[in-house]
Amino acid sequence: MIVVADTSVLLNLAFLGLDHLLPGWFGEVHIPEAVAREFTRLTASPGRFGGFKLPACCLVTAVASIPRQIASSPRLDAGEAEALALALASPSSVLLFDEVAARAVAVSLGIRVVGTLGLLLRAKNDGLIPQVAPLLRRLMVEGRFRVSPAVVHATFELVPKRRTRKPT
């Protein structure tokens, strides 16, 4: 299995200070050249992503060609199209994607997708973060992460409930 990432997930994890979790979960994360360029451009300017570094586990991987079924999707940017092409070329790959249109294309191609919220849930389940809600709130307010209320609700339904002891 290979893991391929798009820019948004990498930036969102860096924004939350959680990008160090990627190598422990996946070892290497492949990113296409367009994603590397976009990450560099967005982190070179001042602002919410300014100064972030590409995680060392990210391997920039060239994309030979973009398959027709991906190239014909007008709502994809260059990084999304190249990430989809990389994932499609590797059976049983996992794609780290947040954007709705790109996720829809990935699912239609049979590619497994995990987004920032899925990674936050994994971090909570693995005991690596104490809570999801404060991180999601920060991401939405300060990081300008856009997510529907329905997805937020569904995410919180998946957060493991804390067990409480009954008084003896």
Image (cartoon, rainbow, N blue to C red):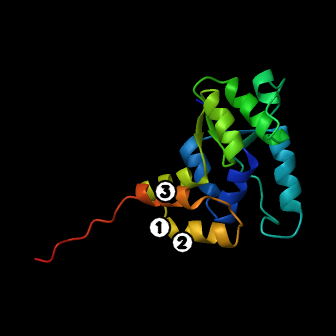
Q: Which mark is residue 131?
A: 1
Residue 101: percent from left, percent from top:
71, 42
Residue at the (76%, 53%) spot, across then down: 54
Would residue 46 be found to the left or right of residue 52 on screen?
A: right
Which amino acid type corresponds to the residue marked 3 in the rendered image? Thr
Location of residue 95 (image quadrant): top right
Which amino acid type corresponds to the residue marked 2 in the rendered image? Pro
> Label 2 vs label 3: CA separation?
13 Å
Residue at the (82%, 28%) spot, across then down: 71
Give the labeled residue for mark 2.
Answer: 134
Q: Earlier in the sequence, mark 2 or mark 3?
A: 2
Residue at the (75%, 49%) spot, across then down: 7
Q: Which mark is residue 155?
A: 3
Residue at the (25%, 70%) spot, across then down: 164
Query: Which quadrant of the rendered structure holds the N terminus?
Result: top right
Q: Are marks 2 and 1 in contact (CB under 8 Å)?
A: yes
